[in-house]
Amino acid sequence: MSSDLCVLLPTVNELPNLMKLLPQILDTFPGATILVVDDGSNDGSREYLRNLQHHSKQIDLILRPARLGIGSAHLAGIKYATSKGYTYLITMDADLTHRTEDAKLLFRDLENSDIVIGSRYLKDSKIEDWSNLRLIMTCLGHITTKIFFGTNIDMSSGLRGYKLKSIDLDLLEKNCPSNYDFFFVSILLFIHMNLNISSVPAVLNNRSFGKSKMSIPLAISGVLKLLMYGFRLRRVSK
């Protein structure tokens, strides 16, 4: 039931993309709630979202004063959806790189899984119109995690589905970083908790408007922190 579903969109200055994406989500998931966690947008996003919220009960907002990190936005969304009693949470990027068709496949798989990842590395996955640098960064990160942790999970994917009752919020809050490395570390935690994690193929497009919030330093920092955290978690597990 999509009424049991919350869809999380972390945003910073994504007005043109939101104007396209929000109707697509509402059409794909009738009855679902869209939660936008906005980190200090100054492009008119907040005014647009407030007006939309005034006319639709399906729009919820968390308006934060500044950029507090993509990881902290995801954690805020997970906490909010859990506190409101939703059964499922889907997280998507707000820049139109993630497709609602893939989110729908992911939602269907949540019935039999605790976590579902929209993966760029399955047979029917595809990455379209990304720059060579972004492709190289993404692939190197995936190869690193695959070699070190022995998993083919797309650990940096932001297209995810959560069965909220399976999530240990205290563990996430105590261990997950606030930035990009949240994605890696949270998956490592879910593996450590023996959650049932599945993957569905995803087609990723290039963003339509605006500039990517990801940078080379953030990506490198994320992988390094993951490896450091992995060593620490292994010691705790012994």
Image (spheres, rainbow, N blue to C red):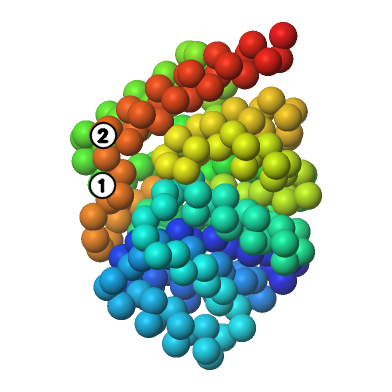
Q: Residue at x 48, y 63 (%)?
A: 37
Residue 235: give x, y in percent of width and height. Answer: 64, 11
Give, as a three-letter code, the residue at label 1: Asp
Label 1: how many Cα within 10 Å (few below 14, some 14–19, many 20+): few
Image vertical order of residue 3 relative to residue 167, above or below:
below
Mark 1 secondary-structure assignment: loop
Closest to the observer: 54 or 2? 54
Left or right side of 122 for 215: left
Return the mark for residue 129.
Answer: 1
Give, as a three-letter code, the residue at label 2: Ile
Which of pointers 1 and 2 indicates the residue nearer the eye?
Answer: 2
Mark 2 secondary-structure assignment: helix
Q: Residue at x 52, y 89 (%)?
A: 54
Left or right side of 192 for 97: left
Residue 181: give x, y in percent of width and height. Answer: 45, 35
The quadrant the C terminus occupies is top right
Q: Work out whether residue 238 can be spotted.
A: yes
Which residue reaches farthest bottom? 55
The quadrant the N terminus occupies is bottom right
From the image, tell me which residue sits under label 2.
Answer: 216
